[in-house]
Image (cartoon, rainbow, N blue to C red):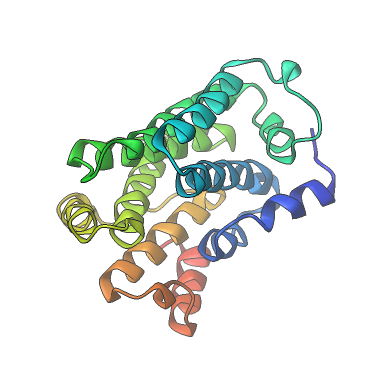
Amino acid sequence: MAQPDGTLETLHETLPLAQRLALSYAPAAARDPVLALFALDARLAGLIRHSSEPMLAQLRLAWWRETLRRDAGEWPEGEPLLAALRGWRGAHGELEVLVDGWEALTAPAPLPEAALRQLAEGRAAACAALAHAVGAARDAGAAGALGRAWAHSDLAMRLSRPDEREAARRLATREAPARPRVARALRPLAVLAALAQRRMRLGEESAAHSPAAMLLALRVGLLGS
């Protein structure tokens, strides 16, 4: 079901800049499912970031977990993100693992490596599910690898504690494969992984949206690598 432009625009405005840039390389037929995934990830990240206590974050994450388990026909109206997720045509349940991944970050500090891995695997599984949702199932494994690379590099810059960032950096360095080529519908994932790795390598937030980053996104988004 196509969503009204206003709904999509509302979601687009919730995305971090790197995700907005990556989304611009999605072909029209894949844009809505990609937007829904990016917006869900951003919403879950925000729940962690803006909850004053881990338990509050866990309660809010539990609502999303239960909602993703339900049939879309049972969802309340008026929530733009749920409206967009209806475009996954019943496959939204595959995104529950992303909720679990974000919940792992509510563990006491310092976060263990297992928690960082769980978020990375949650993003990987969600990206693999996206491959199925956009008709590129043969690239599900590659999409998962891009999601994992995106997560590790992103955490290396986003976590608040230096020791946690260093742990994420080690994971990113140790486990990051060469970025695989994927179908055009999945190019936004390749762009995200490339921008996150560049930001981590240079150690600067601006490295994801500088003129050089725009050129990198253009190359990856159009050529795939």
On the rendered image, what quadrant is the N terminus found in?
top right
- Disc tally is 0
Q: Is residue 213 above or below residue 119?
A: below
> Can you give x and y, in whole percent of width and height, for residue 95 in the image?
50, 29
Q: Please give left or right for residue 109 compared with residue 194 in the image.
A: left
Q: Is residue 44 above or below residue 19?
A: above
Q: Is residue 219 above or below residue 16?
A: below
Point 70% across, 21% down: residue: 72
> Can you give x and y, in whole percent of width and height, for residue 167 in the image?
17, 53
Point 32% across, 62% down: residue: 157
Q: Is residue 213 visible?
A: yes
Q: Nearer the viewer, residue 5 or 44?
A: 44
> Can you give x and y, in whole percent of width and height, for residue 105 in the image?
34, 40
Q: Residue furthest bottom?
A: 211
Q: Nearer the viewer, residue 146 or 9?
A: 9
Point 68% across, 55% down: residue: 12
Q: Nearer the viewer, residue 221 or 65?
A: 65
> Can you give x and y, in whole percent of width and height, for residue 175 in the image?
19, 49
On the rendered image, what quadrant is the C terminus found in?
bottom left
Point 48% across, 33% down: residue: 56
> Which image quadrant for residue 172?
bottom left
Q: Is residue 137 visible?
A: no
Q: Please give left or right for residue 192 compared with residue 116 in the image.
A: right
